[in-house]
Amino acid sequence: MPRPLRQIFLFAVPLVFGTIFQQLYSFADTVIVGRCLGTDALAAVGATSSLHFLILGFVQGACVGFGIPVAQNFGADDHEEMHRYFWNGTWLCVFLSAVLAVAATGLTETLLTVMNTPEEIFSMSARYIGILFMGIPASILYNYSASVMRAIGDSRHPFYFLLFSSILNIALDYVLIMFFDMGVGGVAAATVFSQFVSGALNVWWMFRHMEDVRVKKDEMSPSLRHVKRLCIVGLPMGFEYSVSAIGAVILQNAINSLGSTAVIWVVLLAAAKPLVYIVLGETVSDVALGAQRYLFLCSCLFVFHGSLMIFRNTLQGMGYSFHAIISGVWELVGRSLGGWLAVHAAGFTAVCLANPMAWIFVLGYCVVLVFYMIRKNEKRLGIYQ
């Protein structure tokens, strides 16, 4: 294997597995809630998934973006600038943590009402997502610290700590439900605490074992120039994730209008047929069949999602963040169309196909744009034949 490809592979593998284990948070919640608390509680968790994705997507995108100037200056061997960006990114994350947590928590019931959350699961949904919103600082702590560690070449330890926190989350889910009778609130609290632990472990490792991270007073002071650059790079990436998530919120609105059972169908998208029965048992056949149908249609077309991520991230890497945001807008349009069809025409079939429709729609835009930009840059550099 050529050396650059080998380095990319070794760096990317922990990222891939980290993403998989990050999904264990939601999957573990789904299994334990479904088996221990019943279908109404499972519907309450499912009804908030797109809303959680809206906020979490912004956090993840912004934190990855804040790590880019850190990576650029680390690669340029300019450690003073690297630390200025690191510390200013830290203060920016503290500010975002406070603003997002307060705003999202305060708007919880309003947002659930706008999304037509079924009355029978409204209070449980509000309790669950409200705790997750209060835990936004824990999510930012993990995502920013992991982004910085990856920026300076360590993708392994964020994965190790995430794996540990995933196992911790599963254990806490069970303990808080079965022994403390905390219901869906216990599931949310377990998620927040586990995220905090993984973030705290990242911070401990950075300052204890990574020589390139240091505490130096003159490098820690806020700088408008550095904050401005961080916002220019990071916020568009956060908005890109959120624009895509808005489409999911619109689709969730349509799903909620179909009733709490349809909410349960969609929350099982991470489970194949045998796992559907792990989550629900064999007593809710209609729900299980709906989940299997959703999974089958989405999984058959998931190749379009993978292709979309490649071309959209290529645009980001080439520096065309604005066009990546526009692709998110097109994804919003595709999901909105699926939501409209779900309510007015095709019912649950449109719910199943809404995401694949959006992926295919946006993929065409990104493919054309990537090849156009590559050709344009080759002409500019005089290497186009």
Image: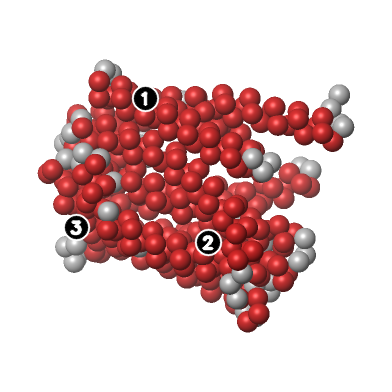
**Left or right: 285, with 13 as reference point:** left
Q: Residue 294: image x %, image y %?
A: 33, 29
**Left or right: 233, with 344 as reference point:** right
Q: Which residue is mark 3?
A: 183
User: In the rendering, which numbered label is found on residue 144?
Assistant: 2
Which circle's residue, 2 or 3, is located before the other in the chain?
2
Give the spatial CA distance, label 2 vs label 1.
34 Å
User: In the rendering, which numbered label is found on residue 158?
Assistant: none
Which circle's residue, 3 or 1, is located before the other in the chain?
3
Question: Residue 271, relative to residue 355: is it above or below?
Answer: below
Q: Nearer the viewer, residue 14 or 309?
A: 309
Q: Which residue is mark 1?
A: 337
Marks 2 and 1 close (CB-CB < 8 Å) = no
**Left or right: 27, with 263 as reference point:** right
Identity of the residue drawn at 50% across and 24% down = 360
Identity of the residue drawn at 19% across and 57% down = 183
Give the crowd class for mark 3: few <14, some 14-19, many >=20 residues within 10 Å: many
**Is label 2 or label 3 in front?**
2
Element under label 3? helix
